[in-house]
Amino acid sequence: QVQLVESGGGLVQAGGSLRLSCAASGRTFSTYAMGWFRQAPGNKREFVAVISWSGGRTYYIDSVKGRFTISRDNAKNTVYLQMNSLKPEDTAVYYCFPTHYGSMTPMADFGSWGQGTQVTVSS
């Protein structure tokens, strides 16, 4: 029923910045905690960051802490990931998805993943 569309990726040099957006259509996701995940070539999809349904709590993996900021605008049905001081190891396809806050795992029964947005960081 709900469709997730990620955007904002691109090619940047190390140290640069990008802001990713995740827009939902079909229904609001304002009652869900939302997370960002990424998948690099040769790797499995991994959790990156999550924000609670109200936006009052966030959590990040150690490798992006202090560099990435997750936020949301429920009126626009949109979640963002501001990425600063990018490193080549951040290169991946980035996805958003409803997430269990605590276990940091995707909500398995929610629906389908979007196509993601490609982030490439060169050295």
Image (cartoon, rainbow, N blue to C red):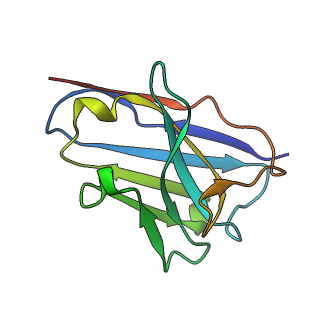
Give the position of the N terminus as an image quadrant: top right
Left or right: residue 78 compared with residue 85 = right
In-front residue for pair 108/8: 108
* Residue at image location 30% in from the left, 59% down from the top: 65
Left or right: residue 101 compared with residue 107 = left
Q: Residue furthest top?
A: 42
* Residue at image location 60% in from the left, 70% down from the top: 102
In-front residue for pair 61/51: 61
Horizontal and vertical percent position of residue 107: 74, 55
- Above/below status of 87 relative to 96: above
* Residue at image location 52% in from the left, 61% down from the top: 50
| Corner quadrant of residue 76 | bottom right
In-front residue for pair 21/112: 112
Horizontal and vertical percent position of residue 45: 56, 35
- Above/below status of 123 relative to 2: above
Horizontal and vertical percent position of residue 68: 31, 55
